[in-house]
Amino acid sequence: MTANSSKDIAITTLLSVGQHPLSARPRRAEEDARALEVMLQFAPASMKALHAGDTADAQNLTVLKDYLGMGIPSIDVIPTSADSDAAEALASYLANAGDGQPHILLTGTRSEVGESSGFLPYLLAEKLAIPFVPNICDILSIDMAAGVAEVMQSLPRGQRRKIKTQLPFVASVGMAAAIPRQSSFGAARRGVINTVSSIDTVADEAQTAWKTEPARKRPKRLKVVKAKTAAERFKAATAKVQSSGGEKIYEVDKAAEAILKLLKEEKVL
């Protein structure tokens, strides 16, 4: 797995509170849990989990306990509010950590609540002035002597690509990574949540000017069968259209009702 002892490796994973897509209840974020699973394969490396959020929320603490149940001994929590700039707080913590900057910083590709823009790992890599590798599914090897790591990046349609990058680096972990292990009740009870009070948070000035509203369901496009060959295009242009179950409606009101009914059946409206 590694060219050096895993004890020399320092890995940090950023964790967020996710949201179930149907019930909207807080849960482990799917991609963050996968990032944590990638980190745990390098035990007994120096592993650290980090979260920026509201520590006063009991539901958030329950989710953090679920992360602890995966086997990490503790989670460092930076208290932030909804209008705080999480990127600034996290970058300040990582840059001024007493045990030094980690060799590898893992995140999910995007959060399940809030802005969910996916910009956080990019911003952290920029602020820390280190490389960023998006959407990885595994870390293949780490050579501490050469200062190089080899990762597997997931691409569309199930493709994979090996990438070599310099240490330290930031990487986002996608859904192609290994499924995270179940949370153990005993490990969750033994785990410790440490509140980091030495980091000064700043307000996200850009966010204060935004106007947010619930997302609207996008209309569904009607399926259009396209002819691929010249013969099929000629046939489609010259063939007589056969009616199947249609009707001629001459009254405007009834015609409008029929059109509206069709659009609802096709889930365009």
Image (cartoon, rainbow, N blue to C red):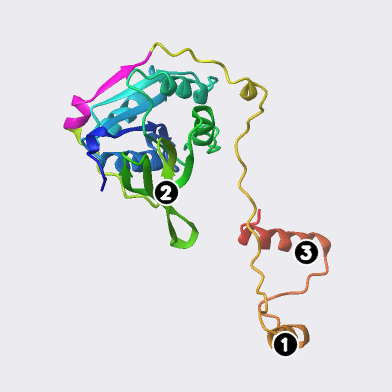
Does any portion of residue 173 appear in the rendered image?
A: no
Q: Residue at 46% across / 47% down in the picture?
A: 135
Q: Earlier in the sequence, mark 1 or mark 3?
A: 1
Q: Nearer the viewer, residue 152 or 247?
A: 152
Q: CA distance from mark 3 to mark 2?
A: 63 Å
How many labels sit on residues? 3
Nearer to us of marks 3 and 2 is 2
In the image, is residue 172 above or below residue 123? below
Magenta residues, start to end: 186-196
Residue that label 1 marks: 235
Q: Is residue 134 magenta?
A: no
Furthest residue to the left? 186
Identify the residue position indicated by label 2 in the image. Answer: 164
The answer to whether residue 36 is left or right of residue 52 is left
**Amino acid tagged 1:** Lys
Q: Which residue is mark 3?
A: 255
Residue at the (28%, 28%) spot, across then down:
65
Q: Nearer the N terminus, badge 1 or badge 2?
A: 2
Left or right of 208: which side holds 22? left
What residue is at 40 percent from the left and 42 percent from the top? 31
The answer to whether residue 108 of the structure is visible from this angle is yes
Identify residue type, mark 2: Lys
